[in-house]
Image (tube, rainbow, N blue to C red):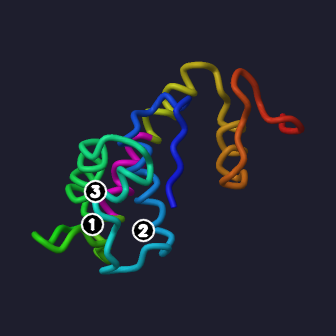
Amino acid sequence: MISLNYRDSRPIYEQIKDGLRKLIVTGAIGTDEKLPSVRALATQLSINPNTIQRAYNDLEGEGYIYSVPGKGSFATGDPDADTSRRKELWEKTRELVAELRYLGVSQEELMALLEEEPSGGAPAGGSKEGTQ
């Protein structure tokens, strides 16, 4: 369901949040489907339940899940959650593009990046082989 990368620079709760968000957005967790309990997921991932609770709280704040006291957390089918996330990502993208332009990345290189497959990417410190 969710895998953690302890070498990732992102905090564990963010990795959990991103993993759950991806499962919800792709439909792997359906609308109104119950998420694993905080304790069950913490046990499964061998991490502190507070870490899971933080991820759940953030996802609830973003509109991806909702909580029912005594019942648990459930995925929401709220299209506004996607709109909110889209705005957030749009702003992050603007910042990244500005930084890339500052570092000398050309308009053509940025356009090539947009046309790449989603799983593609440039290795650290250089461009992807065969693109230039």
The kind of residue on which mark 3 rests is Val
Residue at 49% across / 29% down in the picture? Answer: 98
Q: Magenta stretch: residue 122 in it?
A: no
Task: Compute the Cα span from label 1 to label 2.
Answer: 9 Å
Are discs 1 and 2 less than 8 Å apart at CB? yes
Residue 38 circle label: 3
* Magenta stretch, residue numbers: 83-92
Mark 1 or mark 2: which comes first in sequence?
A: 2
Query: From the viewer's perspective, is the residue at label 3 or at label 2 nearer?
Result: 3
Are discs 1 and 3 less than 8 Å apart at CB? no
Residue at 27% across / 46% down in the picture? Answer: 49
Q: Picture quarter containing residue 62?
A: bottom left
Prevalent SS, magenta region:
helix
Question: Looking at the picture, does residue 7 appear above or below residue 42?
Answer: above
In the drawing, does residue 82 fall left or right of residue 98?
left
Residue 57 placement (x, y as % from top left) = 21, 52
Residue ID for mark 2: 24
Residue 124 placement (x, y as % from top left) = 69, 25
Mark 1 or mark 3: which comes first in sequence?
A: 3
Which type of secondary structure does the marked residue at label 2 adopt?
helix
Q: Magenta stretch: residue 87 in it?
A: yes
Mark 3 or mark 2: which comes first in sequence?
A: 2
Q: Dot 2: few (<14), some (14–19), or many (≥20) neighbours within 10 Å?
A: many
Residue ID for mark 1: 65
Task: Compute the Cα span from label 1 to label 3.
Answer: 13 Å
